[in-house]
Amino acid sequence: MIAGLAKGLRVIEGFTADHPRQSISDVAEATGLDRATARRCLLTLAELGYAAHDGKYFTLTPRVLRLGTACLATLPLAQMVQPWLDQLSEELGESSSVSVLDEGEVVYVARAAQRKVMSIALMPGSRLPAYCTSMGRVLLAALPEDQARARLAAMALEARTPLTVTDPEALMARLSVVRAQGYEVIDQEVEMGLRSIAVPLLDAHGRTIAALNLGLPVRDTPLEEIPARYLPALERLQAELKRVLR
Amino acid sequence: MIAGLAKGLRVIEGFTADHPRQSISDVAEATGLDRATARRCLLTLAELGYAAHDGKYFTLTPRVLRLGTACLATLPLAQMVQPWLDQLSEELGESSSVSVLDEGEVVYVARAAQRKVMSIALMPGSRLPAYCTSMGRVLLAALPEDQARARLAAMALEARTPLTVTDPEALMARLSVVRAQGYEVIDQEVEMGLRSIAVPLLDAHGRTIAALNLGLPVRDTPLEEIPARYLPALERLQAELKRVLR
DNA sequence: TCCATTTGTACGGATATCGCACAAATACGG
DNA sequence: CCGTATTTGTGCGATATCCGTACAAATGGA
């Protein structure tokens, strides 16, 4: 375990949307590192071109994006599914996305936006909590029960809308249903006015490696008709991709 | 300079689209690090959850994206311009983007896609060479001449299409024109069938901090009519943003 | 203006890291 | 099938690196 690397990465992650510009002391407090250590990390990052400092405050530079995007490109999944996603979106007239699980969050790896229904713009790299999203539920359902429970326990289950399910046991029960039926429908648990339906994407061995979903404005379809109307297209794509995903 | 951090970041950057799965020795060769060092870095990254290894090969995990997106979110620019970009795209019926310069490449920080004209999907974090893109030219033109020349000299000027300008002096001359007229129009230098027009985004002090562009399919508008038709909207947005960008 | 508090920087001691060297495994040709 | 050549994985000592303290500088409040 090479400590300096761990510290540096913690420092980078310490730069969030809320704290884009931080002094050495800010970073030290945010990361729990000693001020002297934080300083060395920041100076190193600056020297390598990952950070810039205007005397007092440090900022990350676009160069940091090389780190993440190298990984996005690394995911053969993203490039592989994009054309299918585009076609699916066009065919159904709704936005579709593919995501993977990272701890308790879903990370969008590919997306074909059809129209704007959400207040926040989702794009590759965006994150949403797993417990209240259709793709998140599908991905959690693919884990062994104890692992799924652990991930739910590790994060704040917040009621984002009046409809959000936040009780851990209720969520676990829901995961059983998802596991059995092979898909999940979410009704306005992330944001009012937005529903979604998701299915897992399986590789050739049948292991869940990602999730595929459609975002559906409430007015488009009555809740109970959603599976009948959209599931066939999703499952068709699921089957096609199952053959090509390694 | 904290060496371990520098090594680790080099290792992460070593994972490209071409080399998504690498053994310890692969990484050692790609980065120029000692095998033992590469091993320590990879094991550390794995322990921290940034990498996964299946016995022999290492892969980056989606967690690495946190680093990049931390930076994207860090750019207040991205969130700030997104609504304007959406509106602009809708109004004109064309894709618009905002990017910043990193070395010799433009990095997309926000984008509103209207239709698919490019073979490659652009998204926040995507990169294109500066010398052959309208935003790249605009951003290079904002640098002192010697710096612009240095950046051109530092990278391979490849003819991506028959129309791509690759002569450094011709490019420098073009930058002068861009500097004088305040915008740039590119005719199929990145990809056949695609034109684009870009203007700089200025902060309140008049410094160029990013570039704004429109991607235009060739059939939409004759080349010579592009400025008259699209420049007013771009410059209006440029002026509006100038007041709000710090 | 002065004091209190916070912030940034230098230095020596301790320790974790580096890269060598060796061992194990694989590949290949005779 | 065996021996050689090449690649890969890992332990260990020397050494360069990093940690935390202590001090200086700057800020802010009274």
Image: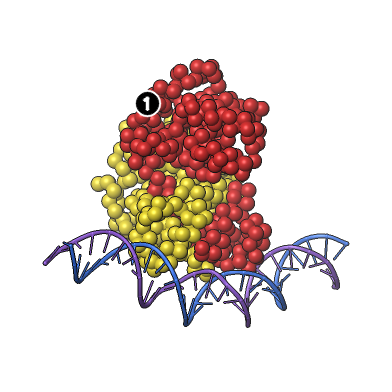
Chain colours: A red, B yellow, C purple, D blue
Answer left or right for C9 relative to B91: right
- Picture residue at 40% right of the left edge, 51% below the top: B54
The number of numbered discs placed on residues in the rendered structure image is: 1
The answer to whether residue A90 is seen in the rendering is no
Q: Considering depth in this image, is B106 or A87 the residue closer to the camera? A: A87
- Picture residue at 48% right of the left edge, 36% below the top: A142
x, y percent for residue B156 = 32, 58
The answer to whether residue B1 is seen in the rendering is yes
- Picture residue at 54% right of the left edge, 64% below the top: A3
Q: Considering depth in this image, is C29 or B98 the residue closer to the camera? A: C29
* Relative to B68, residue C29 above or below: below
For label 1, the crowd category at 10 Å Cα-Cα, with few meaning under 14, some 14 to 19 and many 20 or more, is: few
SS label for mark 1 = helix
x, y percent for residue C26 = 28, 59
Q: Residue A153 sits in which quadrant?
A: top right
* Relative to D14, residue A150 above or below: above
Q: Residue A25 sits in which quadrant?
A: bottom right
x, y percent for residue B107 = 44, 49
- Picture residue at 59% right of the left edge, 53% below the top: A15
Residue ID for mark 1: A236
Query: In which chain is the residue bearing label 1?
Result: A
Answer left or right for B154 relative to A150: left
Amino acid bearing label 1: Arg
x, y percent for residue A138 = 50, 33
